[in-house]
Image (spheres, grey):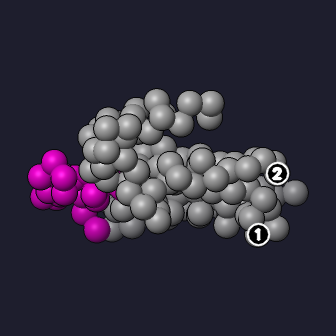
């Protein structure tokens, strides 16, 4: 990132929106500015001192994950996303919708769909040789 001030301003503004930013640092570069944007230690503020209403940036240094394998990398990259979604919903007063009576919402159908998705993910991350 060449302009940390403008980037910080954009991130603080974007924290009002329903999305997250995941940055994966590749190589041996100095990623101290990425850690600043991550906001884990100190809430990110814009150039006027306004703090981001929520932490939407997650930085993952690839060099720390390289020896742990693809599954651990995927887990770490996605680790903060659920909390970000919950934080956004709480900020906007959005509550979970009630399950309806459709076939897709029944517990057995939900479990079957989840198992299918997990099976698909497993095939992608652990392809058969």
Whether 102 is among the magenta residues is: yes
Depth check, front residue: 105 or 69: 69
Sequence-first disc among 2 and 1: 2
In the rendered image, the vertical position of residue 17 relative to residue 69, given as above or below: above
Residue numbers of the magenta segment: 84-107
Percent of width and height locating residue 34: 59, 49
Most extreme residue toward the right is 129
* Crowd band around label 1 with a 10 angstrom C-alpha radius: few (<14), some (14–19), many (20+): few
Percent of width and height locating residue 35: 57, 55
Left or right of 34? Residue 20 is left
Residue at 73% x, 50% y is 30
Most extreme residue toward the front is 48
Give the residue number, with chain letter if any, for mark 2.
Answer: 28
Label 2 SS: loop
Total number of numbered labels?
2
In the rendered image, the vertical position of residue 14 relative to residue 27, given as above or below: above
- Which image quadrant for residue 98? bottom left
Q: Residue 17's mark? A: none
In the rendered image, the vertical position of residue 20 relative to residue 87, given as above or below: above
The residue mark sitting in front, 2 or 1, is 2
Contact flag, marks 2 and 1 (Cβ < 8 Å): no
Left or right of 17? Residue 23 is right
Work out how far the residue at label 2 is from the one at label 1, CA to CA, in angstroms: 17 Å
Residue at 38% x, 37% y is 47
Q: Residue 68's mark? A: 1
Percent of width and height locating residue 103: 24, 54
Residue at 45% x, 56% y is 39
Q: Is residue 84 visible?
A: yes
Q: Is residue 117 visible?
A: no
């Amino acid at each position: 990132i060449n302009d940390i001030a403008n980037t910080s301003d954009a991130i603080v503004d974007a924290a009002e929106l329903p999305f997250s930013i995941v940055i994966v640092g590749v190589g041996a570069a100095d990623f101290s500015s990425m850690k600043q944007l991550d906001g884990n230690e100190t809430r990110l503020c814009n150039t006027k001192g306004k703090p981001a209403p929520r932490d939407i940036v997650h930085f993952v240094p690839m060099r720390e994950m390289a020896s742990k394998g693809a599954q651990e990398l995927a887990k770490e990259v996605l680790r903060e996303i659920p909390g970000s979604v919950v934080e956004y919903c709480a900020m906007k007063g959005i509550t979970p919708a009630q399950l309806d009576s459709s076939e897709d919402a029944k517990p057995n159908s939900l479990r079957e769909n989840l198992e299918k998705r997990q099976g698909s993910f497993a095939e992608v991350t652990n392809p058969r040789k």
